[in-house]
Amino acid sequence: MATAAEPVSLSASDIHLAFGPNAVLRGVDIDVPAGTSAAVIGPSGSGKSTLLRTLNRLYEPDRGDILLDGRSVLADNPDRLRQRIGMVFQHFNLFPHRSVLDNVTLAPRKLKRLGAEQARELGLEQLDRVGLRHKADVRPGTLSGGQQQRVAIARALAMSPQVMFFDEATSALDPELVKGILALIADLGADGMTMVVVTHEMGFARSTSNAVVFMDHGQVVESGPPDQIFEAAETDRLRRFLSQVL
Amino acid sequence: MQEAYVIDTLHLEPVKFPDYNTVYASLKTRQIDAWVAPSQQAQGTVQPGDPAQIIENTFSLDNFVAWAVAKENQPLINALNSGLDAIIADGTWARLYSDWVPRALPPGWKPASKAAPAPQLPDFAAIAAGHQQPASAAAPKSTLSQLKDSFLDWDLYKQAIPDLIKTGLPNTLILTVSASVIGLVLGMALAVAGISRAVWLRWPARVYTDIFRGLPEVVIVLLIGLGVGPVVGGLTGNNPYPLGIAALGLMAAAYVGEIFRSGIQSVEPGQLEASRALGFSYASSMRLLVVPQGVRRVLPALMNQFISLLKASSLVYFLGLVANQRELFQVGRDLNAQTGNLSPLVAAGLFYLLLTIPLTHLVNFIDTRLRRGRKPGEEDPLAVSTSAEMI
């Protein structure tokens, strides 16, 4: 099942970001061609999650440029930009006071001015896609972690994004639920969605992404096709990291 | 003048009582030892069997009405005397005197000119003896019956309750609800300003909250009710009622603002982040997602604030309201001041409890619901949408 929007390319160059005296991103370059997925790996605190939030301008970069579909987006309205980029979080961040269906349809209704009936149809379609149509009317709190993350994915997809970000989407899940979510993400990639996936699942990064980016201390240390990163690491830091996580 | 004399010359500290009834109540409870009272006042107040008695009535029988005329103004003296002589002669003087000042004339004293005959007056002593009540052998009342008298005077309840229902209750509710509306609207503005990143918004909200939360309620009511009154007199028609509402509302806003702020800040930052990641602006995110969740969490605290406000509404008493503006407390207090009996205040208190106790239990109910979540299969009373498909 293809998403409504045509996939676009995403690239960023020389991204710098500091919180006060604390430099979190120190000149990051990343290039994700249209319809491909990039896995971002690296130790905790390396700036992976911050990079995602800077690419959709939840944080404004101090320096550098972000290109979506080959065009700089730094002068755009950031709210408009974020409507084009779906994001899935480690802790789901569903809206607990609204039904599952409302979670999915809120943004299309309010931001795309979809009518109630149309929004409902769209919401049920998205929930169907993640296998949770029958939970449309319950509160997210009654769902398991895996189900909540599926709803979060449906919520992001309902806005027909051109790019999807996954920020450690399986890190907060019970081990037996991880596989299902990873399969869902892999399906999205197979459908041709442009994706940036921050993950600790090395097997997943290797098997389903077109490129792997290794970050440490706010910089991209090494990047390339999965086989090259996992089999022929060029730097000591990547080799050390891989020896610890594999 | 008297006060200055007591303080500056005698170096004593006077205690001021608002009215005679309060003085007498203090006397009965032995907070004071004696009361030098106006004769009539004491005779009207001290009842047989009370734990207090009049030990001496120094009311002077020689208090007669006189006209002061300059000694050499003989024509005026003559005129007055001839007038008096005339009404003494036709009996008018005796009738007026008997009706209004029925007591014996001082020995050897005669009104008007010496030439006139003495007025024919009845024998007051004999009449008084005839009216003499059999010396009431009222035994001192027991403590229990004294308490019963001062708290449970059914006649006063009957007198107070219609006023409490017709005047007090509506006014208390009007004051409380209007002030709550002001408090909620202004409080929400204060909360949003208080968590704003803009210093020029955050700072004034902070100062406002500190001042209005830091002052005693009665001070705010008096300062706004009496201080602002003359300034906006044209607007309010010099009616302190709207100012009372304003004072209560401004005060409530400070507390409500802090309650809202704590609620909003207790919402996980991930909620705002997720909302903004979907493309909602900061304002929309707050309005649609963060604030509704924050408010839900602080509903019990808000209800408590509402109860406080209900009680604080009695403070408009200090602003001096006209009869039909009186709220519960003032209705009870006025009748209490008239009669010196506490029953009307007890009645007013019962009305407050009638309002506050159910509210308190509602708070507990909401609190338990929010803590435990709803029971399976049960509708969430706070939910906007219904859960049709609970599994």
Image (cartoon, coloured by chain):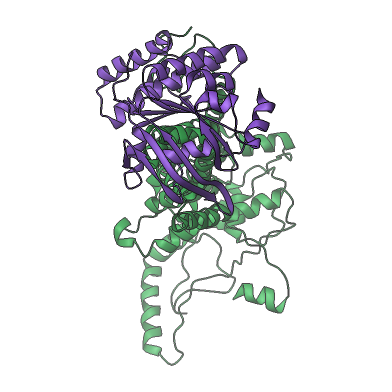
| Nearest the eye: B292 or A47 | A47
Chain letter, green = B
**Image quadrant in which you'd find residue B107:** bottom right
Relative to B95, A201 lies left or right: right
* Residue B390: percent from left, percent from top: 46, 9
| In the image, residue A44 above or below residue B53 | above
| In the image, residue A101 above or below residue A166 | above
Residue located at (29% from left, 61% from top) = B234
Relative to B99, A122 lies left or right: left
* Residue A119: percent from left, percent from top: 29, 20
Residue A88 visible in the displayed image: no
Residue located at (59% from left, 27% from top) = A232
| Nearest the eye: A155 or B15 | A155
Residue B346 visible in the displayed image: yes
Residue located at (66% from left, 25% from top) = A245
Residue at the bottom extreme of this rendering: B72
| Nearest the eye: B383 or B183 | B383
Residue located at (72% from left, 58% from top) = B34
**Image quadrant in which you'd find residue A69:** top left
* Residue B132: percent from left, percent from top: 61, 47
Relative to A164, A16 lies left or right: right
* Residue B170: percent from left, percent from top: 40, 37
